[in-house]
Image (cartoon, rainbow, N blue to C red):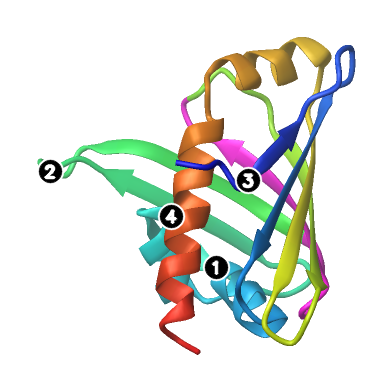
Amino acid sequence: MERKTKINAEDGKQELVITREFDLPLELLFKAYVEPEIVEQWMGTKVLKLESKKHGSYQFETTDTKGNVVFQANGVIHEFVPNQKITRTFEMENAPFAAQLEFLEFEQLTDDTSKLRMHIVYKSVALRDQMVQMGFAPGLNMAHNRLQDIVSKLK
């Protein structure tokens, strides 16, 4: 399967740039990041809190079939401009990784297509390299494919 989500990790830099074009109008792509019901579907996690506004916060949690928590993440939204950008922190609970800063930019390409650009800044080059080596790229691509499938039904 073609990987449509592109990840650029320049050597020696503590950042990643992730881009993905979607066959979705800009408003629907943005909605997929700010409406809890939609986020839960494509991310496959429970949204405990999602305050889609400046100075808002969010909290996600994933459990196994027995109800044990296997993943928790949270952050603060620093900038929120509808259909344009979200700047937020992202931190995994009970994980050895420091918080990261994420700049999400949403761009309309045509009436029916849009682009997401994520610029993620890590505390260090070593931490960024560790995240890349964990092999999250296929999972992110799968999540973006689910986002495309789920949200396209909302058209």
Residue 80 higher or lower than 82, as above or below: above
Q: Which residue is mark 2?
A: 65
What residue sits right under mark 1 in the picture? 50
Above-or-below relation of 39 to 87? below
Residue closer to the observer: 119 or 50? 119
* Marks 3/1: CA–CA distance: 24 Å
Q: Disc 2 residue type?
A: Thr
Residue type of the residue flagged with mark 3: Thr
Question: Nearer the N terminus, badge 2 or badge 1?
Answer: 1
- Identify residue type, mark 4: Met
Q: Residue at x 46, y 38 (%)?
A: 139
Q: CA distance from mark 2 to mark 1?
A: 24 Å
Check disc 4: other Cα within 10 Å, few if <14, some if 14-19, many if 20+: many
Earlier-in-chain disc, 4 versus 1: 4
Where's residue 55, x and y in %? 76, 66
Mark 4–mark 2 Cα distance, whole angstroms, equals 17 Å
**Label whose residue precedes the other's in the sequence (3 or 1):** 3
Front residue of this view, candidates 54 and 130: 130
In this figure, which residue is indicated by the disc labeled 3?
A: 5
